[in-house]
Image: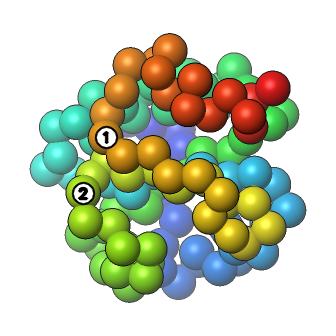
């Protein structure tokens, strides 16, 4: 299983919106095969770039409020937050090089 921190509807503001870190939220669900496929890749990116980006996970089935607020209609969906604002959205499971390319501006 992933070592990314789980966030919830209740903890989202504190864990993501009020953080000064660059945070990527992985919106996922237990039943989603592509979500399970991308999870270990996100763990690798998180451990290799822990000084630049923090990755957390939000289960959309258990936390429908945040999924609705951020208009998550397809998973996996990853949104990068900085200063409480979404600055980047990545949709779908991708291989590590493609994800790193999508996140290059945050990993540099």
Residue shown at 36% from the left, 73% from the top: 71
Mark 2 and mark 1 lie on one chain; the one further toward the N terminus is 2
> Tag 2's secondary structure?
loop
| Residue 32 sits above or below residue 107 on the image | below
Q: Which residue is mark 2?
A: 74
Residue 82 as seen in the image, left or right of residue 46: right
Residue 43 is at least partly visible in this image: no
Mark-to-mark CA distance, 2 and 1:
8 Å
Q: Are marks 2 and 1 in contact (CB under 8 Å)?
A: yes
Residue 68 is at least partly visible in this image: yes
> Tag 1's secondary structure?
loop
Out of 13 and 6, give the one closest to the viewer.
13
Q: In x, y percent, where is residue 74?
A: 24, 57
Give me the disc on residue 92. Answer: 1
Q: Residues within 10 Å of mark 1 (few under 14, many from 20)?
A: few
Out of 99 and 18, give the one closest to the viewer.
99
| Residue 27 sits above or below residue 53 on the image | below
Q: Residues within 10 Å of mark 2 (few under 14, many from 20)?
A: few
| Residue 72 sits above or below residue 55 on the image | below
The C terminus, quarter of image: top right
């Amino acid at each position: 299983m992933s070592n990314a921190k789980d966030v919830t509807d209740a903890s989202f503001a504190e864990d993501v919106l009020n953080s000064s870190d660059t945070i990527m939220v992985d919106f996922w669900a237990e039943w989603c095969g592509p979500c399970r496929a991308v999870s270990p890749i996100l763990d690798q990116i998180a451990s290799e770039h822990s000084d630049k980006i923090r990755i957390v996970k939000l289960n959309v089935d258990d936390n429908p409020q945040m999924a609705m607020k951020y208009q998550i209609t397809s998973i996996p969906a990853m949104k990068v937050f900085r200063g409480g604002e979404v600055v980047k959205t990545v949709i779908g499971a991708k291989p590590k090089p493609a994800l790193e390319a999508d996140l290059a501006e945050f990993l540099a």
